[in-house]
Image: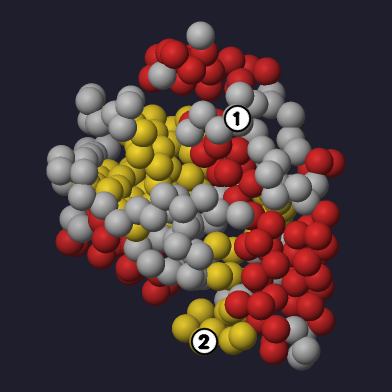
Amino acid sequence: MTTIVIDLNSKIIAADSRTSADGCDNDEFLIFIDDRNEDKILYLKKYGLIFCFAGHGPTDISWKKWLRNETECFPAYPPKKKKTVDGITLEYIGAIIAVVDLNKLNCKIILGDEKLINYSINNDAIFIGTGRRFAQEEWEESHDAIKSIKFASEKDIKTGGEIKYFKFDNYDNNLSQIRINHCETRRLFREEGRVVYKKNINIEITASIEANRNPKIEERLSKQDDLAATMDPNSDYPTSASTKPVWPECEKVRVEKLLRRLMPDKFQ
């Protein structure tokens, strides 16, 4: 997934920029890319809103396109994921999307699994994603969102890369605002991807080299190659059509109601 820290008191949001290959949740390794300059934070000046995204690349792209008015297609609902822990299989929503209203200085979780979200005692800081516990541990000592992401990247296998941030009071930020081509990213997992094993996340190995030794890694890379070759790079939801989830009606009604309050002209 990722790690995101929203600090309402210090008026900053920070996030990592690691892109992970899907399908590795129950593997002993993770395949990732850290140098795609991807933003998991999106600032919409018109509305005074900051959105952040964690968990599923195609879902994130779908939302970003809709928020930027690049498509009229309502954004996708994230897929359900399964994770096995101590022999027990758990199901959870595979993405988290949150929004910060800069005018009211509050944060709303648009959708996502609450089990992957932590809050500070006073609810003035929100910690999202797989590295949330580590980020909160550091934040409670330093109250520094950027340091918190850095600490999480040292402990959480799915957190890494350049730390992106946006400051609410003076709009200082290091966002690239690059439109990521998800098909190209899938191809790059073989060309530029790295592998870390969960038993030692401090050792990174070139994915293409490790694939010669570990057939599971070759299987995951081949899956990414196949998806890159068959997906439409201009699609609003760049993944295989058969895996696109359907919005639960009650969830869509709830999310639309929230979004209408935040950006009413999007629904006119």
Q: What residue appears at the point 69 percent right and 26 percent down from the top-left corner? A: 247
| N-term-proximal mark, 2 vs 1 | 1
Relative depth, front residue between 253 and 50: 50
- Which mark identifies residue 169? none
Residue 35, how many percent across, how many down? 48, 70
Can you tell which quarter of the image residue 155 is in? bottom left
- Label 1 crowd bin: few (<14), some (14–19), many (20+), radius 10 Å: some
Q: Is residue 154 visible?
A: yes
Q: Residue furthest top?
A: 268
In the image, residue 258 above or below residue 145 = above
Q: Is residue 95 visible?
A: no
- The image's colour scheme reads secondary structure
Instruction: Quadrant for the N terminus, please.
Output: bottom right
Q: What residue appears at the point 75 percent right and 47 percent down from the top-left corner? A: 232
- Which mark identifies residue 71? 1
Residue 183, how many percent across, how many down? 69, 57
**Of the two numbered discs 2 and 1 in the rendering, the one whose residue sits closer to the viewer:** 1
Indicate left or right for 229 with 91 as reference: right
Q: Amino acid at mark 1?
A: Thr
Badge 2 marks a residue whose secondary structure is: strand
In the image, residue 54 above or below residue 122 = below
Which residue is under mark 2?
Answer: 203
Relative depth, front residue between 44 and 57: 44
